[in-house]
Image (spheres, rainbow, N blue to C red):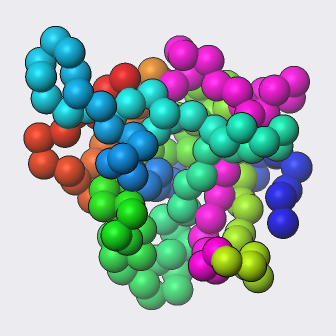
Amino acid sequence: MEVDPYDEPDLDGEDVVIRRVNPDQHLVKDESTGKLRTSSKLFTPSSGPKGGMSVDVLKLIESDGLDPREFVTTPVFIGSVAFKARAARDAGLRIGYEPIVDVPGVDDNPYHGEVWGGQEKPNRFSRGQKRELAAASTWFVALPDVEIKI
């Protein structure tokens, strides 16, 4: 079920969210260094009218006693970055819960959240907002020799 974009008051500024990295979609070769780096697509919301950028909420995963690094790592998502909810808000974005449950063909994820843009265009982030998220991110499940930058 798609929720209307909002800002969740239960997500404290210090709460950590995790963005999964799909190397086929989120990594590019840096022309200046010749090494891999994250692409701006890693910090881009989905295109639907209420589309946000998918994240997983660390405190929810931990509260169920799961290993968060194991939970966010799949054959498709081999790495992940993390940033605090405050970083999204400081960039002028909203962040909230959007659990994925009982969606045909999709694994349940009760820890799923979204980061959305402004009221007018929740499915759009400016280049500056993407840069702010990249700058605030650190590796959660590191990909060796890959730099977080756009």
Magenta region includes residue 125: yes
Residue 105 rendering spot, x and y as whole percentages: 67, 77
Tell me: residue 32, above or below residue 73: above
- The quarter of the displayed image where residue 108 is located: bottom right
In the shown orientation, is residue 59 left or right of residue 10?
left
Residue drawn at x 66%, y 42% as measured from the top left: 46
As for residue 58 lying within the magenta part, the answer is no
At which x and y percent is residue 145? 11, 41
Residue stretch in magenta: 106-130
- Residue found 52% across the figure and 86% down from its top: 64
Give the left or right position of residue 72, taking residue 44 as reference.
left
Question: Residue 128: horizontal and vertical position, in percent?
Answer: 53, 15
Above or below residue 28? Residue 104 is below
Q: Is residue 110 at all visible to an observer of this figure?
A: no
Residue 47 placement: quadrant? top right
- Seen in the image, is 66 located left or right of residue 79? right
Q: In the picture, which quadrant includes the N terminus?
A: bottom right
Count of numbered marks: 0
**Between 125 and 88, the one nearer to me in the picture:** 125
- Identify which residue is drawn at 22% across, 22% down: 30
Q: Is residue 107 above or below residue 8?
A: below
Name the residue: 70% across, 27% down: 124
Q: Position of residue 78 (x, y in %)?
A: 30, 61
Q: Label the magenta part by its dominant secondary structure.
A: loop
Q: Visible in this render: residue 107?
A: yes
Q: Is residue 137 left or right of residue 43?
A: left
Location of the C terminus (image quadrant): top left
